[in-house]
Image (cartoon, rainbow, N blue to C red):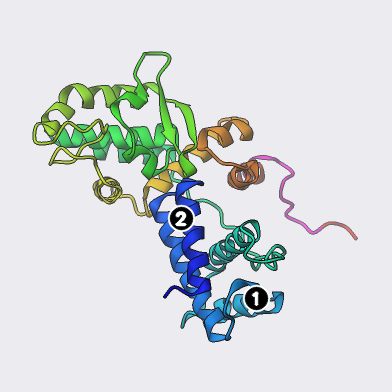
Amino acid sequence: MVNALDAAVRDFLAHLVVERGVSTNTSAAYRRDLARYTAFLEGRGLPDLAAVQESHLGDYVTALSTGEATGTPMSAASVARAIAAVRGLHRFALLEGLVGVDVAASLRAPARPKRLPKAITVDEISRLLDASGAGDGPVPLRDRAIVELLYSTGARISEVTGLDVDDIDLTPGRGAVKLFGKGRKERVVPVGSYALDAVDAYLVRARPALAVTGRGTPALFLNARGARLSRQSCWAVLRKAAERAQLTAHVSPHTLRHSFATHLLQGGADVRVVQELLGHASVTTTQLYTLVTVDSLREVYAAAHPRAVSDTPPAR
């Protein structure tokens, strides 16, 4: 028999998938976080969400941070994600009439240190692109198209592997791709000429050969069996290209997304335009990249301005 806590979590997870349209990975992460939370509540003898008080939530945050609830202390980012799941559950319970008050409404995660996104240089991007297309046959053409598209659009890996052939417009001068972000939110992003050429070459000279063994999937990027390329395979494409290019920095699909944003801002793009291109819900998220460009400007200023750095201490 399902107890009240488990039933509330089950209904909340169903709500996230059916009504909010969250991805499978997001749903799985919420499921893990809430399983940990319900285990904590049951260990405190709390039979349902209506019995939870603010003090219990404070104890839970402490248990996550110290490792009491997990065996090892969780990072600030992991604690923040776990708290987001708890807040969502309690808000849902209030809307469904399971509780009379949302005791988690004021719950906040511990402050997270700001981490600057890691980007690679334009020269390193060029080396990565050249390395991704090295070799003969359809696979190098596909791999070059994937890397070009990731960097040209700043797309997430799931957005690129989820593309269908009809989602990209290869018209010269008007090239664009339709991306589906978090919660299936749609946005249209321009595609540069280099990426358009790479995708066109792949569609004409490589995709037909890969599609022979498949079952007619509309997916843009195919694996050797003619099926949609997975996110894991896309990771492998970048890892191999980075090794061939002898790049010492860790290169992932998110590295190209960071580089896309950083290079646009360094080139003078408005932060709100970059926000739209990245599909960020809030400009605050995008503004993290401006810290990178300010640091770059500060370095140039310190090296070039004749009175940026004094050799002698100021007069008192």
Quadrant containing the C terminus in the rendered view: bottom right
Please give the name of the residue rendered at 19% of the width and 21% of the height, measured from the top-left corner.
204
Q: Earlier in the sequence, mark 2 or mark 1?
A: 2
**Residue 60: x %, y % from top left:** 60, 77
Residue 98 lies in what quarter of the image? bottom right
**Residue 216: x %, y % from top left:** 17, 31
**Residue 206: x %, y % from top left:** 16, 28
Residue in the foreground of this view, choosing between 294 and 12: 12
User: Which residue ends up furthest to the left in the rendered image?
Assistant: 213
**Residue 22: x %, y % from top left:** 46, 49
Please give the name of the residue rendered at 32% of the width and 37% of the height, measured from the top-left corner.
147
Residue in the foreground of this view, choosing between 130 and 315: 130
The residue under label 2 is 14
Let me know if residue 113 is in the magenta part. no
Residue in the foreground of this view, choosing between 190 and 213: 213
- Pointer 2: residues within 10 angstroms few (<14), some, or many (20+)? some
Q: What's under tag 1, amino acid-wise?
A: Val
Magenta residues, as a range? 303-313
Quadrant containing the N terminus in the rendered view: bottom left
Q: CA distance from mark 2 to mark 1?
A: 22 Å
The residue under label 1 is 52
Is there a contact, CB below 8 Å, between mark 2 and mark 1? no
Left or right of 208 on screen, residue 131: right
Left or right of 306 on screen, residue 244: left
Residue 217 lies in what quarter of the image? top left
Residue in the foreground of this view, choosing between 36 and 187: 36
Secondary structure under the numbered disc 1 in the rendered image: loop
Let me know if residue 312 is in the magenta part. yes
Residue 199 lies in what quarter of the image? top left
Please give the name of the residue rendered at 52% of the width and 65% of the height, measured from the top-left corner.
8
